[in-house]
Every structure is written in C-alpha cells, then in structure tokens.
C-alpha cells in the first residue's frame, strides 16, 4: 500500500504523526503543494516565501537522507492531491490538522480520502471549550482550561526509514517557484535566520538550556530574552509539544508555557470565527471613523518605513522590514500606534505584518491585532491607548533603538526616547508625526463616535 503525506505547516520529520501513520501502512509519497489560489488574499506573504524556499530545501534533504523524496506541485491543493491519488494509485492522504479557514475548506473537500492527525497544538483545539461547548474569548480562562490537558502528549518517534513507492511521480523544481526576492533582494537582512528542522531543534535546545528570567526579559527589546522560535513553530519545523517538553520539564514557572498556549488559543478563535482576520470581533466597531484620505496614506507610509518621529515605533518597524521579525513588546507598541495614534484601520497593519513577518500566522496575527485595537472578542478596550514614550522608557529600549535607528545612536539613554525634546533637528530625524495628547484625544473621540 502507498499513501500520500500532505505537508503544510508541519515541515518536519520528528514528532510527525501523519508520517508515522503513513509509514506504518507502507510506502510514502511526501508532497508539498504551493497553493496561491485557495487562501485568496491570505496567500503566503513575501518574507515567508523566502522562509518557505529554504525550509522546503532543508526538508527535501532530510527526506533524501531517509531514502525518500519531497514531491513539489503547484495549484489548487484539492485538485492537485486528487490528481496525485489517481496518478500514483495511493490509498489515502495523511496530514496534520490546520485551522486556517482555507485549510479546513480543503480538508472538507478531500472527504474520506484524507486521514487527519492532531499534532500541531498542545491539546486538540476542539477540546478546549467552555462548559457549554463554546470557544473561550478570554485568554486567562482558556489557559486555565488548557492547563488541565498539560503536560501535552510526548512526541512520537521518527520512523527509522521511509519506504519509497515503486515509482515516483514528477516533481516541480523548487527554483522554478521563484520564492526568493530578486529585485530588490531585501533578504540580505535575514542572515540571522536559518529555516529548517535542524536549526529549529538547535534553537529550542539552546533556549531550554539558557533561559533566564524569561518572564521579565521577554519584555525588554534590548535583551535577547525570548526564544525566537515563532517562524519555526509557524512552519511546523518543530512541534509545540516537543518545545514544551524540552523547555518546561524542569521549569520553575510556567510563563513560557503560557505564551505557547496563545498559539492554541488563537486557532480556537479562528475556528469559531473564520473571518477574524477581516472582520471586527465586535461589530459595534464597524462604525469607527478610520482615517483613509491622502494624509492617512502618508502616515501609513511613515509607519511602514519607520519615519514617525517616535524612536521605539521606528525601531520596531525597521527591525520588521530588515529582519522579518519584531520583538513582541514592540509589536504591541507599533500596532497600538497605528490604530490609536494614527487612527488607521488595524487591517492595514495586519496586512503589512502578514507580508513582512517570517512568522506571519493567520490566527496569531489576527487575534493579536484585534487585541491591541480593542475591536476583538476579548477583554481589551478601545480606550486603552499605549503611550509610546512611556513604554520606551519603562522597557529600557535605548540599545534597541540604537541598533535599528542608528542616526540616534549618539543620544544618551535618557534622551534617546524623545529626540524632539532632546533638540534633534528634522534633517537628522523626523519630528513627531502627531503629539501624544492630541492623538489620544482624537482616538477617544473616535471610540465615542463608534458607540
Ligand atoms: P516567545 O516569547 O519565545 O514565545 C514562544 C512562542 O509562543 C512563540 O514563538 C509563539 O509561537 C507563541 N507566542 C508567544 N506570544 C504569542 C502571542 N501573543 N500570540 C500568539 N502566539 C504567541 N506571532 C506569530 O507567531 N505570528 C504572527 O503573525 C504574530 N503577529 C502578531 C501581531 C501583533 C500586533 C502582536 C502584538 C503580536 C503578534 N504575534 C505573532 C505574537 C508574538 O509577538 C510572537 O509570537 C513573538 O514575538 C515571537 O517571538 P518568540 O518566538 O521569541 O516568542
């Protein structure tokens, strides 16, 4: 018997339950389908195409070492897989479950030919619900329920060998997919990243061994306090339960596990509300008077390119563009700035992140953007407005700003948060795009108008 192994955001051989089942049944044909049609506007963004290219190359190498291959096809995933079933005479398709609306649509359309496995979460997403069977809207309550299911299952062992089929179907050439940027090639700034399972494992082990004061350090942009596992986790180069067992088995507190739990939570939200990336969680916010004229377009551009005159915001946006990633605290500050200070629709920011982040994730991005905006189903309120200067000081961002906004490097730790105040000339660094008090009042008025 031969089975297809449909790989999506689970580009790994370790703790890969779909592979284990397919291999136990006989020969395996591993397939990756580049589908830019089914997800519509949520097709893979620019930075992630770079990541995907390297991750697929790495996976193909790992499969080859096991006597197997990675078959690459392009097109509507459901059609491509049905064709492959016919072409190869395979009995079934094994895959790990995913929760993006287009993933679930494809899973449904494949019907009985598809055998789905859990394996991308700490606990099966459908099982963590309220007593009434509804999804949780508030993370605190979700976490309490998820904890009852921890520790997660142990990772499943990797098959010792993977049996090849009698004949291999044709595969596209990865280079023909043109996933890498060329003109311009902005990916030189991604040099710190190495996509692929081997690095994901190495990174998780190093974090487990060296993690100190995660709870405090993860909030300090100038420190390397978080795991930087997000793109590896998004692409499933390592499973979240493997990370959990590496890091938490002897952990004195559960602050890191709590962050890992967010991944499960956001998939629960998008399972219940599949259009969460496009629609306000609370419909009353549909009436927010977003700015969208020429001035707003200029402001959006200033935000995207890191020219707002607020160093912490500009440092974050430049880090995002240049490295494909941004520190979590700064994601909150920059997102809040776009939505509240500039009064620009959170969906504009969500899109920009989608295209620029190597860890862009449908659930994580949408839920976090709506959380910051205060438009979501959870508890954050529109009236909660982050003060960028106070945040920058409180979280000691001076060195972080020096790294990403080098024109300010000579300012002192005290002065660097507010160059206007320190007497910086506009030809050295832009003046503030809007004053904090003025922005705050405008945002509060917009909230009142929506109600
Ligand atoms: P660590 O602190 O080491 O956390 C470990 C893992 O837990 C992360 O890799 C991630 O998988 C998960 N995690 C941690 N915090 C969150 C969170 N708030 N929500 C969901 N998962 C979390 N994360 C994404 O993976 N993809 C996104 O597209 C994304 N968009 C975001 C947009 C905004 C506006 C904000 C405020 C946050 C967003 N996040 C997103 C969440 C968070 O910023 C990143 O997961 C985190 O910074 C990744 O760095 P790390 O791996 O070092 O995190």
Image: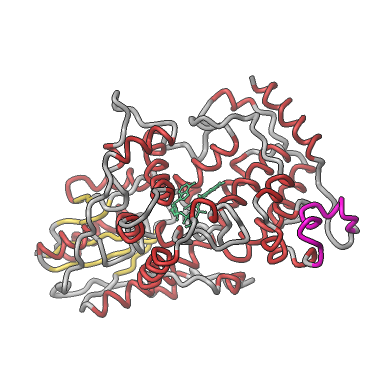
User: Could you say where residue 243 lies in the image, as x and y percent from the top left?
Assistant: 34, 59
In screen coordinates, is 178 left or right of 390? left
Q: Residue at x 76, y 53 (%)?
A: 417
Does the segment drawn in magenta span residue 422?
A: yes
Q: Residue at x 56, y 60 (%)?
A: 325
User: Could you say where residue 331 lies in the image, as x and y percent from the top left?
Assistant: 59, 50
Outermost residue, top side = 451
User: Across the whole image, how many numbered discs are drawn on residues?
Assistant: 0
In screen coordinates, is 285 left or right of 440? left
Q: Can you tell which quarter of the image residue 381 is in?
A: top right
User: Could you say where residue 367 lies in the image, as x and y percent from the top left?
Assistant: 49, 40
Q: Residue at x 76, y 39 (%)?
A: 293
Main secondary structure type of the part rendered in magenta: loop
Q: Quadrant of the N terminus?
A: bottom left
Does residue 382 sit above or below 69 in this rendering?
A: above
- Nearest the camera: 218 or 43? 218
Q: Can you tell which quarter of the image residue 169 is in?
A: bottom left
Span shown in magenta: 410-424
Does the segment drawn in magenta span residue 318?
A: no
- Nearest the camera: 425 or 82? 425
Q: Quadrant of the C terminus?
A: top right
- Nearest the camera: 92 or 249? 249
Does residue 167 sit above or below 431 in this rendering?
A: below
In screen coordinates, is 93 left or right of 51? left
Q: Residue at x 87, y 55 (%)?
A: 422
User: Could you say where residue 403 lies in the image, as x and y percent from the top left?
Assistant: 69, 66
Q: How is the image coloured?
A: secondary structure
């Amino acid at each position: 018997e031969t089975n297809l192994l449909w790989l999506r955001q689970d580009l790994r051989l370790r703790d890969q339950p779909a592979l284990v089942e397919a291999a136990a049944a006989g020969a395996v044909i591993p397939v990756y389908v580049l589908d830019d049609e089914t997800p519509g506007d949520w097709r893979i963004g620019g930075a992630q195409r770079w990541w995907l290219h390297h991750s697929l190359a790495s996976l193909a190498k790992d499969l080859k070492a096991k006597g197997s291959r990675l078959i690459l096809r392009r097109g509507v995933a459901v059609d491509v897989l049905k064709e492959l079933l016919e072409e190869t005479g395979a009995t079934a398709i094994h895959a790990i479950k995913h929760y993006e609306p287009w993933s679930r649509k494809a899973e449904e359309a494949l019907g009985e030919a598809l055998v789905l496995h859990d394996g991308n979460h700490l606990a099966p997403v459908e099982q963590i619900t309220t007593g009434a069977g509804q999804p949780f809207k508030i993370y605190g309550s979700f976490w309490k329920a998820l904890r009852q299911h921890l520790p997660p299952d142990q990772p499943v062992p990797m098959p010792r060998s993977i049996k090849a089929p009698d004949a291999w179907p044709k595969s596209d050439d990865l280079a023909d997919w043109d996933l890498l940027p060329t003109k311009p090639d902005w990916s030189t700034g991604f040099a710190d990243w190495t996509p692929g399972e081997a690095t994901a494992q190495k990174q998780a082990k190093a974090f487990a061994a060296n993690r100190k004061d995660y709870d405090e350090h993860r909030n300090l942009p100038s420190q390397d306090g978080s795991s930087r596992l997000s793109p590896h986790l998004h692409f499933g180069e390592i499973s979240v339960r493997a990370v959990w067992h590496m890091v938490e088995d002897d952990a004195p507190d559960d602050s890191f596990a709590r962050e890992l739990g967010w991944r499960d939570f956001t998939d629960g939200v998008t399972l219940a509300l599949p259009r969460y990336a496009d629609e306000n969680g609370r419909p009353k916010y549909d009436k927010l008077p977003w700015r969208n004229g020429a001035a707003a377009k200029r402001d959006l551009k200033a935000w995207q390119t890191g020219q707002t005159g607020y160093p912490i915001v500009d440092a974050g946006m430049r880090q995002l563009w240049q490295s494909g990633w941004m520190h979590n605290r700064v994601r909150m500050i920059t997102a809040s700035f776009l939505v509240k200070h500039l009064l620009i629709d959170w969906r504009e920011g969500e899109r920009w992140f989608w295209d620029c982040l190597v860890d862009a994730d449908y659930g994580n991005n949408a839920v976090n953007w709506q959380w910051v905006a205060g438009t979501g189903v959870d508890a954050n309120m529109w009236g909660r407005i982050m003060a960028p200067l106070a945040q920058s000081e409180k979280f000691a961002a001076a060195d972080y700003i020096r790294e990403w906004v080098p024109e300010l490097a000579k300012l002192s730790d005290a002065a660097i948060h507010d160059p206007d105040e320190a007497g910086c000339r506009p030809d050295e660094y832009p003046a503030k795009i809007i004053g904090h008090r003025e922005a705050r009042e405008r945002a509060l008025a917009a909230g009142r108008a929506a109600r």
